[in-house]
Image (cartoon, coloured by chain):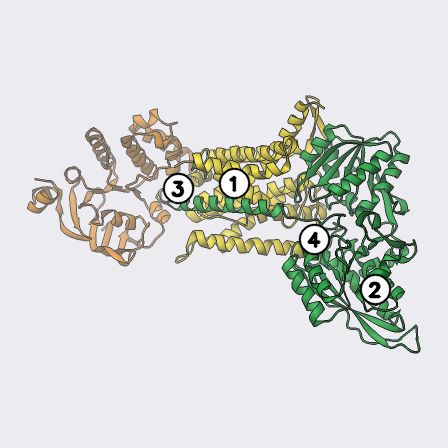
C-alpha cells in the first residue's frame, strides 16, 4: 500500500471524526451565543442520543428511523431543559448558574444511563459494512455515510438559519440580543429553538459516533471537550468557524496517529488552541 | 460584554480540561475485561452472614471456625462493573462452601465469611480498605483490586501486617506490581491472558498454514515484555511480525491504528490484551482487512458476535476467553446460580475468574493444613506445580510462573479456544498453556 | 391621551435616574425630549420599550397599561424604538437586517412588498442590500436602523439620538427622512442632544435635567426660551 493510500484513508477518517465534532460545536455555539450559557452537559445529550437509538433499535425500529426519532426526542428534551433549568430568572447570575446546573446535569444523566443500561460498552447497527475503493485505497463506507449525514445536517441548518423567519431571528438574537428584543423577537423562544436544534444535532452526532465507534455512559466527555476547543478555535458564534475548527481537530485525530503517534495527536489540539489564542484571541473566524 | 466573558471562561475550561486529560491518559492502567450487558448498579452487599453450619466432614477433634477473607474491589466509578462481578462470584463461592457445611482445613472445619470493601478505584481507597480489613476485621486473607496503583497500596498494608494478599489482576511480568520475590506475601491465583499466545499460534499454523505475517495492535501500557515474548513464539513457528502499533489507553477510534497495520498487508492482525478487541476487529474489517483476527484478550466470543454484528466481519476470528456459550459443567453451575439469584442481570464472564481465586487459596490452605502463617502458605503454593494440584472451574490447573516471574505464584489452568466463522461461534476446546 | 407617562421613576443599580417624569404624545405629533448627557432621556425610551422596568409610575399606550410589559408585546402594539447603538445585527446583510425587522409579520408576501417599499425610500441601502451591516458608514447604519424599525410597521417611532456621530450632511439627510416618516403618518418621539435639530423637527418638546422635566411647551416657545437658548442652543 502506498503512502498516498494511507493519507487518503487517514484523511477520510479524520474528516468523518471532524464532522461529528462540527455537529457538537454547532449546537454548543448556538446555545452559547443565543442563550449566553455554557451548556456543559451537551456531551451527555450526545450520549443520551446514542443510547436512545440503541433502545429504539432494540425495540425493533430501523437504524435510520431510530436516529430521526432520537433527534426528535432530544430536541424535546432540550426544550424541557431550557424551560425547566436554564431559563433566566431574576436574581440569578446566568453564566455561573448555567455552569453549576449543567455540571450537575452531567452527573445525573451519566448516572441514570449507568443504572438503566449498565457500564459495559454497547453498540449500534453499522451504518454500512465494508469499504469502497477510492484511488485504490479502501475507505470504510460507514465513515463516508457519517460524513454525508453530517453535511446534510449542516446544509439543512444553514438553510434554516438563512432562509426562514425563525432562523434569521435566531442569528439576530445571537448577534445583538437587545436589538432583537426591539424587533419583537421573544428571547425565550429563541433559547428554546437553540436548545432544540443543538440537542438534535448532538443526538445525531452521538448516534453516528455510536454506529461507527461504540456506546459508553462516559462517551460524551471527549466530544464535549472537542466542541469547546472548536468554538474557541473557530470563534464564538461562527458557523464557518465551527466547521473549520471541527475539521482541523478531526484531521489531527485522523492523520496524526497514523503518521506520527497517538500521543502527538492528543497534544495537537492543545498546541493549536494556544497558538490561535496567542495570535488571534477571538478565534480563527471570530468577530470582535 | 457577556459573550466575551463566556468566551473567556470557555477558553480557560478548554485548556484546563485538555491539560487534565493529558496527564490522566498518561496514567491509565489496564483492567481485565469487558463482557455482555448488565443492567445492575454497583452493589456493596456484604457476604452472607455465616455462623457454624452442619459439618459434613465431621472431624472429631476439629471445631467449626470462620475463615475471614477481606475483598477490595472498585465498587464505585467506571470500574464498578468489575467490582460487582467479582464480589457476586465470591458470595456465590461462600454460599457453595457454607451450604456444604464448610471446608475442612487441617483438623478444623471453616465457614467462609467475606468482608467486601470498596477501593473506589484509587490507591487511597484501596489503602484505607486494606487497613480496615487487616487491623479492624483481622481477616486471614486479602484478595482483589484491579489497578496497579490499588494493588501496590494494598500490598504495602498487608505485607507490614504479615497477611497474605492474593491479587486479582492479570498483569505483565516486570510490571512494578506483579508477583516477584521482593513481595514475599503476594500471590496471584489468576491467569495471564498472554499465556494464550502459543495456543493461538499453534492453532493458526494448523488451520491457516499460509498465514505467516502478523501485525500487532498493542495498548500502550507497558506491554513491551509481552511483545518480546510473543516475538520469540512467533519466530519459533516460522512466522514474522511485520508491523506493530501502540495505542493509548482510552482510544475509541481504532481506524487510524488499523489503517497503519493494514498497510503492512498482514495475514493476521493480533489484538493484544485489552477490553477493546471487538472495536479493533470492527475497524480492521471496515478497512477491508480479510485475514485472520486474533483476540488475545479476555473478551468472550459472544461479546464479539453481539457488538460487531456483521457476519462477514465475524469470520476467521480467534478468541480465547471464557466462552459462556460453551461452559464447563462447573462454569455452567456458576452461571445458573447467578441467574437464579439475580435473574434480571446478565451473567458477567469475569465472575468465572473471580470464583477461582478464593477457591485456589483455600486449596493452598488445605494443602498447608492451616489457614495461619502467610509465609508458609506462599511456600506451600510455590510447591503446587504439578498439573492437577489445583482445581478450577476450567478443570485441573497448577501453580507456575518461575520462568517468567522468578517465583511460582501464578495460576495456570486450561484456556478455552473458540473461532468465529460467519457470525457463529465454533468451540475448539480447552487448551493447556504451553511453557515456552 | 395616546401615549401617557405618569410620574415615572426608574432606577439603575439603586440610583434614581428618572425621578417622576410625566409626558404625553398624541397621534400625528413629533415630540422631542432634549437634555444633556446623562439627564435620563435614553432611560425613558428604554423603559417605554420594555427593556427596563420602572420603579414607580405608569405608562399607558392606547388605553393599555404597558409598563413592565415585555419588549415584544410593546413592539406588537406599534411602538418601535431605534436605540442609540442602532440595534443592528452587524454580521447580517442589509437585506437580512430588514427581514428581521419584519419578524412579527407572518404574511411573507406583505413583508416582501414592505421591503421593496422601504428600500425605495433608501436608495443607498438598496445599493448595499447584500453588504454586511458592519461595513456600512455611520450614516448608512443609522438609515438601516430606521428602515429596519419601519419594517415593524410602527405607529409610534422612538428615536434615540439619530444624529449622533454623523456628519452635518448626513444629519440633514436623517432629518429629511424623519420628516418623511412623519408625513407618511407615523408619530415620533425624538430624543436628541442636538437640540436645534430636534426643536426644528418637533411640534412640542420637553427639557429633561437630571431626571426631571424642567420645561415643556411647543417647540416654538422653547426656541425662544432664555434657559433653553443658553443651556442647549449655545447662544
Left or right, A64 with reference to C74: right
Per the rendering, the colour in which chain A appears is: yellow
Left or right, B30 with reference to A75: right
- In this view, the mark in front (4 or 3): 4
Q: Looking at the image, tell me whether mark 2 or mark 4 is earlier in sequence order.
A: 4
- The reply to whether discs 1 and 3 touch (Cβ–Cβ < 8 Å) is no
Q: Which residue is mark 4?
A: B148
- Is residue A147 visible to the viewer in this orientation of the structure? no
Q: Secondary structure at mark 2?
A: helix
Left or right, B323 with reference to B147: right
Residue drawn at x 92%, y 72% as measured from the top left: B57
Q: How many other residues sit within 10 Å of disc 3, few (<14), some (14-19) or many (≥20)?
A: some
Q: Which residue is mark 2?
A: B376
> Label 1 vs label 3: CA separation?
36 Å
> Label 1 vs label 4: CA separation?
33 Å
Q: Which mark is residue C104?
A: 3
Q: Nearer the viewer, residue C221 or B329?
A: B329
Circle 4 marks a residue in which chain? B
- In this view, the mark in front (2 or 1): 2
- In this view, the mark in front (1 or 4): 4
Residue B271 screen position, x and y as percent: 76, 40
Circle 1 marks a residue in which chain? A
Residue B234 screen position, x and y as percent: 83, 35
Q: Which residue is mark 1?
A: A229
> Label 2 vs label 1: CA separation?
58 Å
- The reply to whether discs 2 and 4 touch (Cβ–Cβ < 8 Å) is no
> Label 2 vs label 4: CA separation?
25 Å
Residue B84 screen position, x and y as percent: 73, 59
Per the rendering, the colour in which chain B appears is: green
Amino acid at each position: 500500500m502506498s503512502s498516498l493510500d494511507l493519507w487518503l484513508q487517514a484523511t477520510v477518517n479524520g474528516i468523518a471524526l471532524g464532522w461529528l465534532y462540527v455537529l457538537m460545536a454547532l449546537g454548543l455555539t448556538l446555545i452559547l451565543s443565543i442563550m449566553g450559557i455554557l451548556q456543559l452537559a451537551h456531551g451527555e445529550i450526545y450520549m443520551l442520543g446514542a443510547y436512545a437509538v440503541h433502545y429504539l433499535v432494540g425495540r425493533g425500529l430501523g437504524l435510520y428511523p431510530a436516529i430521526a426519532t432520537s433527534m426528535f426526542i432530544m430536541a424535546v428534551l432540550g426544550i424541557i431543559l431550557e424551560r425547566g433549568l436554564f431559563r433566566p430568572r431574576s436574581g440569578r447570575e446566568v453564566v455561573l448558574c448555567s455552569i453549576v446546573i449543567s455540571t450537575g446535569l452531567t452527573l445525573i444523566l451519566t448516572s441514570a444511563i449507568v443504572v438503566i443500561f449498565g457500564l459495559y460498552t454497547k453498540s449500534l447497527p453499522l451504518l454500512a459494512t465494508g469499504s469502497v475503493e477510492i484511488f485504490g485505497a479502501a475507505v470504510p463506507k460507514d465513515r463516508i455515510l457519517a460524513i454525508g449525514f453530517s453535511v446534510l445536517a449542516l446544509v439543512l441548518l444553514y438553510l434554516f438559519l438563512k432562509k426562514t423567519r425563525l432562523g434569521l431571528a435566531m442569528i439576530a438574537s445571537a448577534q445583538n440580543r437587545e436589538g432583537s428584543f426591539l424587533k419583537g423577537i421573544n428571547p425565550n423562544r429563541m433559547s428554546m429553538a437553540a436548545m432544540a436544534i443543538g440537542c438534535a444535532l448532538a443526538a445525531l452526532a452521538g448516534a453516528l459516533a455510536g454506529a461507527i465507534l461504540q456506546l459508553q455512559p462516559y462517551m460524551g466527555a471527549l466530544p464535549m471537550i472537542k466542541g469547546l476547543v472548536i468554538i474557541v478555535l473557530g470563534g464564538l458564534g461562527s458557523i464557518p468557524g465551527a466547521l473549520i475548527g471541527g475539521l482541523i481537530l478531526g484531521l489531527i485525530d485522523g492523520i496524526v496517529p497514523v503518521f506520527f503517534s497517538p500521543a502527538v495527536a492528543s497534544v495537537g489540539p492543545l498546541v493549536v488552541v494556544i497558538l490561535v489564542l496567542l495570535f488571534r484571541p477571538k478565534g480563527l473566524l471570530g468577530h470582535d | 460584554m457577556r459573550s466575551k466573558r463566556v468566551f473567556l471562561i470557555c477558553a480557560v475550561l478548554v485548556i484546563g480540561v485538555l491539560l487534565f486529560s493529558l496527564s490522566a491518559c498518561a496514567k491509565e492502567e489496564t483492567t481485565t475485561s469487558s463482557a455482555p450487558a448488565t443492567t445492575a448498579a454497583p452493589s456493596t452487599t456484604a457476604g452472607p452472614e455465616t455462623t457454624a453450619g452442619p459439618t459434613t466432614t465431621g472431624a472429631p477433634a476439629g471445631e467449626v471456625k470462620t475463615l475471614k477473607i477481606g475483598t477490595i474491589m472498585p465498587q464505585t466509578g467506571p470500574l464498578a462493573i468489575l467490582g460487582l462481578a467479582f464480589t457476586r462470584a465470591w458470595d456465590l463461592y461462600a454460599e457453595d462452601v457454607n451450604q456444604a457445611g464448610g471446608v475442612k482445613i487441617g483438623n478444623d472445619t471453616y465457614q467462609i465469611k467475606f468482608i467486601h470493601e470498596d477501593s473506589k478505584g484509587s490507591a487511597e481507597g484501596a489503602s484505607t480498605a486494606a487497613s480496615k480489613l487487616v487491623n479492624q476485621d483481622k481477616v486471614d486473607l486479602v484478595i482483589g483490586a484491579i489497578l496497579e496503583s490499588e494493588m501496590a497500596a494494598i500490598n504495602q498494608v498487608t505485607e507490614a501486617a504479615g497477611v497474605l494478599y492474593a491479587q486479582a489482576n492479570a498483569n505483565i511480568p516486570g510490571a512494578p506490581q506483579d508477583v516477584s520475590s521482593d513481595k514475599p506475601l503476594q500471590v496471584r491465583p489468576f491467569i495471564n491472558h498472554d499465556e494464550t499466545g502459543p495456543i493461538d499460534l499453534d492453532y493458526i499454523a494448523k488451520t491457516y498454514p499460509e498465514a505467516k505475517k502478523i501485525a500487532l495492535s498493542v495498548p500502550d501500557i507497558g506491554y513491551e515484555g509481552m511483545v518480546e515474548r510473543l516475538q520469540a513464539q512467533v519466530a519459533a513457528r516460522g512466522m514474522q511480525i511485520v508491523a506493530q502499533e501502540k495505542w493509548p489507553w482510552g482510544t475509541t477510534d481504532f481506524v487510524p491504528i488499523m489503517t497503519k497495520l493494514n498497510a503492512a498487508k498482514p495475514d493476521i492482525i493480533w489484538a493484544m490484551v485489552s477490553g477493546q478487541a471487538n472495536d479493533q476487529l470492527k475497524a480492521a474489517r471496515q478497512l477491508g482487512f480479510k485475514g485472520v483476527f486474533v483476540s488475545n484478550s479476555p473478551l468472550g466470543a459472544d461479546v464479539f458476535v453481539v457488538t460487531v454484528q456483521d457476519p462477514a466481519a465475524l469470520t476467521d476470528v480467534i478468541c480465547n476467553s471464557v466462552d459462556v456459550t460453551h461452559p464447563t459443567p462447573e462454569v455452567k453451575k456458576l452461571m445458573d446460580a447467578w441467574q437464579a439469584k439475580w435473574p434480571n442481570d446478565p451473567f458477567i464472564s469475569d465472575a468465572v475468574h473471580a470464583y477461582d481465586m478464593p477457591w485456589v487459596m483455600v486449596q493452598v490452605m488445605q494443602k498447608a493444613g492451616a489457614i495461619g502463617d502467610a509465609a508458609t502458605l506462599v511456600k506451600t503454593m510455590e510447591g503446587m506445580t504439578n498439573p492437577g494440584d489445583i482445581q478450577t472451574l476450567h478443570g485441573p490447573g497448577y501453580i507456575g510462573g518461575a520462568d517468567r516471574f522468578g517465583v511460582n505464584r501464578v495460576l495456570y489452568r486450561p484456556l478455552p479456544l473458540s473461532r468465529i466463522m460467519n457470525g457463529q461461534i465454533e468451540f475448539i476446546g480447552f487448551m493447556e498453556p504451553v511453557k515456552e | 391621551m395616546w401615549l401617557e407617562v405618569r410620574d415615572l421613576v426608574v432606577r439603575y443599580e439603586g440610583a434614581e435616574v428618572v425621578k417622576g417624569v410625566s409626558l404625553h404624545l398624541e397621534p400625528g405629533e413629533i415630540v422631542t425630549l432634549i437634555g444633556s448627557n446623562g439627564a435620563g432621556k435614553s432611560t425613558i425610551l428604554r423603559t417605554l420599550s420594555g427593556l427596563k422596568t420602572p420603579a414607580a409610575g405608569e405608562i399607558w399606550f392606547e388605553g393599555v397599561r404597558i409598563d413592565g410589559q415585555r419588549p415584544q408585546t410593546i413592539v406588537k402594539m406599534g411602538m418601535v424604538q431605534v436605540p442609540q447603538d442602532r440595534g443592528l445585527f452587524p454580521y447580517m446583510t442589509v437585506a437580512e437586517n430588514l427581514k428581521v425587522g419584519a419578524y412579527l409579520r407572518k404574511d411573507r408576501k406583505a413583508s416582501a412588498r414592505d421591503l421593496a417599499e422601504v428600500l425605495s425610500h433608501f436608495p443607498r441601502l438598496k445599493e448595499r442590500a447584500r453588504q454586511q451591516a458592519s461595513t456600512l458608514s455611520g450614516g448608512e447604519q443609522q438609515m438601516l436602523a430606521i428602515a429596519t424599525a419601519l419594517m415593524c410597521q410602527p405607529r409610534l417611532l422612538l428615536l434615540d439620538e439619530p444624529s449622533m456621530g454623523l456628519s452635518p450632511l448626513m444629519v440633514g439627510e436623517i432629518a429629511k427622512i424623519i420628516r418623511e416618516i412623519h408625513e407618511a403618518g407615523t408619530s415620533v418621539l425624538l430624543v436628541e442632544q442636538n437640540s436645534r435639530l430636534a426643536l426644528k423637527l418637533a411640534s412640542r418638546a420637553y427639557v429633561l435635567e437630571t431626571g426631571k422635566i424642567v420645561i415643556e411647551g411647543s417647540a416654538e416657545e422653547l426656541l425662544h426660551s432664555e434657559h433653553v437658548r443658553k443651556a442647549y442652543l449655545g447662544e
